[in-house]
Image: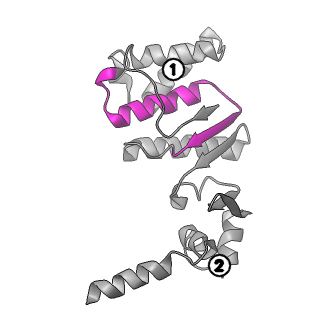
Amino acid sequence: MFLSAEPWIGRLGTGRDFLLAVGRLWEIGADRLFDHVERLLELFRLTSKADVSIGSYSTGERKKIALAGALVTDATVMILDEPFAGGLDPAGIAALSRVLRYFAESGERTIVIATPVPELVQGLAHRVAVLSEGRIAAFATPAELRASARGSGSLQEAIEALLPGGSIDPVARYLEGAKS
């Protein structure tokens, strides 16, 4: 199952209708589907909007219903492009993080997440692939990446150290120029 960073979910129908339709497409059994939809609506705090037209949803609410649509599939492989972006509020980020962490720890699903913000996945990821100029610059555990950058600092700093020219030098040059 693939969920793009900006999924098209339409504006007709309600959030509940959307989730039920996705579940039916994925042939989720009725007993499981109805219960799962209710729990997903609650998870993303969409219960009060469940029977309202998706067209009236905010950007963040549309992102949440799209994420719920991905989760309702029970897909064993999920590819999520920037799932934490697109107007997702702190409660939505926390809920999604906890659910994805559960799946990662349980080994029930394989989840691939594309994100430019390493801190969002450092507690979730078993392995991190760092892409630079369309190529894999590194593929390792978060701990191995930090160790390769002398073990200090954040995952973000470790990744920056792997990139050609690093991104710290241009920042330092910019800040030096800002002092003048």
Tell me if mark 2 has few (under 14), some (14-19) or many (20+) residues whose alpha carbon lies within 10 angstroms of its own.
some
- Label 1: which residue? 37
x, y percent for residue 165: 57, 78
x, y percent for residue 27: 66, 13
x, y percent for residue 65: 44, 28
Pick out the residue farthest to the left: 180
The verdict on residue 66 being magenta is yes
Mark 2 residue type: Ala
Numbered circle sitting on residue 149:
2
**Left or right position of 155 against 57:** right
Pick out the residue farthest to the front: 133
The quadrant holding residue 173 is: bottom left
User: Residue visible at 65% across and 11% down?
Assistant: 29
Q: Note whether 164 is above or below 30 in the view shown.
A: below
User: Residue visible at 53% across and 26% down?
Assistant: 69
Q: Note whether 10 is above or below 64 in the view shown.
A: above
The type of colouring in the image is one colour
Give the CA distance from mark 1 to mark 2.
44 Å
Sequence-earlier tag: 1 or 2: 1
Tell me where the magenta segment starts and ends, as one range: 55-82
